[in-house]
Image: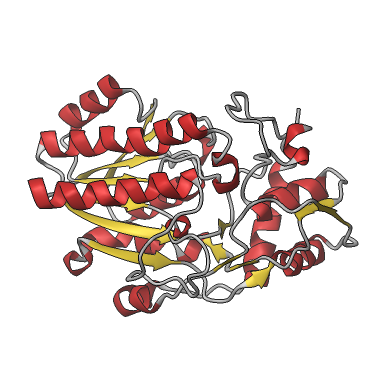
């Protein structure tokens, strides 16, 4: 039985990918430092290891012990907006931690394919719809770090022959998402605010557009990719096709909770206003796995999960490195 490493396995996307791999018969080692995930998200059939991808000794030990055939690297702190203010943390966790895994994969010599979840943040702005053959122009440190890992994987393939698959997901939501993080995942933020009896907060006028993507249109494809060698050494946008405004999303979430829509519009922040991608390529290779779950249905499913778990108390990021130009609402977090 092939041994597979999944990083970020207690997190949202990582835990779902673990489930699909285990259901397909793989022996999964689930690595997570529990900084943003929860141990009860991890499939009980996985071998859970609490630890960080920044712990080089631990990473090397795991690779030597298990001789992984495949690596799924999903561990990241995916907060584009906040990444401007936590630059060192961002590059340490999202870039250097990734390099530790790539080094171990090369040195062990058993890894047939390294699957990496990047982001459409690598495209930046004014490239719509975003397509895989466009020249990336990331606007924030998060996107920069993701693009750097993509480029390193290409370099590692050319130098050492290690195959890879890169997925660029976007605005993924669904069951098990950490709704307590006040800096990222607007769907979860809205749900948490509603359950705490607060107004929904929107930066600017709410006309920003995103294609919100349910986890079941993302995780099965990522997990299945290793069994499709024709996808190796390629990049795929992955997620929903239809963009919605953030204001539209607020209405849909309020309807699902059956509450009156109350919104507090905040000062605009520096962000890419419109972000949605083309998915012709992923349909070509993985079309049979795409369910196209409608946003209303996906939100209703996530609402049930959120209600069962209850609201979570969000906390201010503990080590803000740059406070200049930080949104006032983030400064007030406690």
Q: Position of residue 173 (x, y in %)?
A: 58, 57
Q: Is residue 5 left or right of residue 291?
A: left
Vertical comparison of 40 with 234: above or below? above
Query: Which residue occupies the foreground of this view, 201 or 20?
Result: 201
Q: Can residue 238 be seen in this view?
A: yes
Q: In this view, does 31 lie to the left or right of 312?
A: left
Tell me the quarter of the image containing the C terminus.
top right
Furthest toward the front, the residue is 324
Q: Position of residue 88 (x, y in %)?
A: 47, 30
Q: Position of residue 280 (x, y in %)?
A: 38, 79
Count the numbered circles shown: 0
Q: Is residue 154 left or right of residue 213?
A: left
Query: Which residue occupies the foreground of this view, 146 or 226?
Result: 146
The colouring scheme, among rainbow, by chain, secondary structure or one colour, is secondary structure
Q: Where is residue 116 in the image (x, y as percent from the top left)?
A: 32, 50
Q: Is residue 221 left or right of residue 257?
A: left
Q: Is residue 22 visible?
A: no
Q: Which residue is drawn at 52% across and 75% down?
A: 241
Q: Residue at x 54, y 33 (%)?
A: 86
Query: Which residue occupies the foreground of this view, 284 or 277?
Result: 277
Vertical comparison of 296 with 67: above or below? below
Query: Which residue occupies the foreground of this view, 55 or 317?
Result: 317
Furthest toward the top, the residue is 57
Q: Residue at x 74, y 42 (%)?
A: 310
Quadrant housing residue 238: bottom left
Q: Which residue is drawn at 30% across and 51% down?
A: 150
């Amino acid at each position: 039985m092939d041994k597979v490493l999944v990083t970020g396995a207690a997190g949202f996307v990582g835990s779902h990918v673990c489930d699909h791999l285990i259901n397909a018969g793989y022996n999964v080692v689930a690595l997570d430092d529990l900084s943003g995930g929860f141990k009860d998200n991890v499939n009980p059939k996985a071998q859970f290891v609490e630890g960080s991808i920044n712990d080089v000794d631990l990473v090397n030990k795991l690779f030597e012990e298990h001789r992984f055939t495949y690596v799924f690297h999903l561990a990241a702190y995916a907060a584009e907006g906040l990444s401007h203010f936590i630059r060192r943390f961002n590059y340490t966790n999202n870039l250097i931690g990734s390099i530790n895994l790539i080094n171990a994969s090369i040195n062990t010599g058993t890894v047939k394919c390294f699957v990496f979840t990047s982001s459409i943040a690598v495209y930046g702005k004014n490239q719509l719809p975003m397509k895989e053959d466009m020249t990336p122009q990331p606007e924030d440190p998060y996107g920069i770090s993701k693009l750097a890992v993509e480029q390193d994987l290409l370099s590692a393939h050319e130098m050492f022959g290690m195959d890879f698959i890169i997925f660029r997901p976007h605005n993924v939501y669904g069951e098990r998402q950490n709704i307590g993080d006040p800096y990222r995942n607007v769907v979860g933020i809205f749900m948490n605010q509603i359950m705490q009896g607060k107004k929904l907060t929107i930066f600017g006028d709410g006309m920003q557009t995103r294609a919100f993507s349910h986890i079941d249109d993302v995780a099965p494809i990522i997990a299945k990719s290793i069994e499709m060698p024709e996808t190796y050494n390629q990049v795929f946008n992955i997620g929903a096709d239809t963009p919605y405004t953030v204001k539209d999303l607020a209405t849909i979430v309020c309807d699902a909770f059956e509450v009156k829509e109350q919104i507090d519009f905040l000062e605009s922040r520096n962000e890419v206003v419109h972000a949605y991608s083309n998915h012709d390529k992923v349909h070509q290779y993985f079309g049979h796995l795409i369910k196209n779950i409608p946003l209303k249905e996906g939100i209703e499913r996530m609402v049930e999960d959120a209600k069962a778990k209850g609201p979570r108390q969000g906390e201010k990021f503990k080590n803000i490195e740059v406070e200049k130009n930080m949104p006032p609402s983030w400064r007030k977090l406690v």
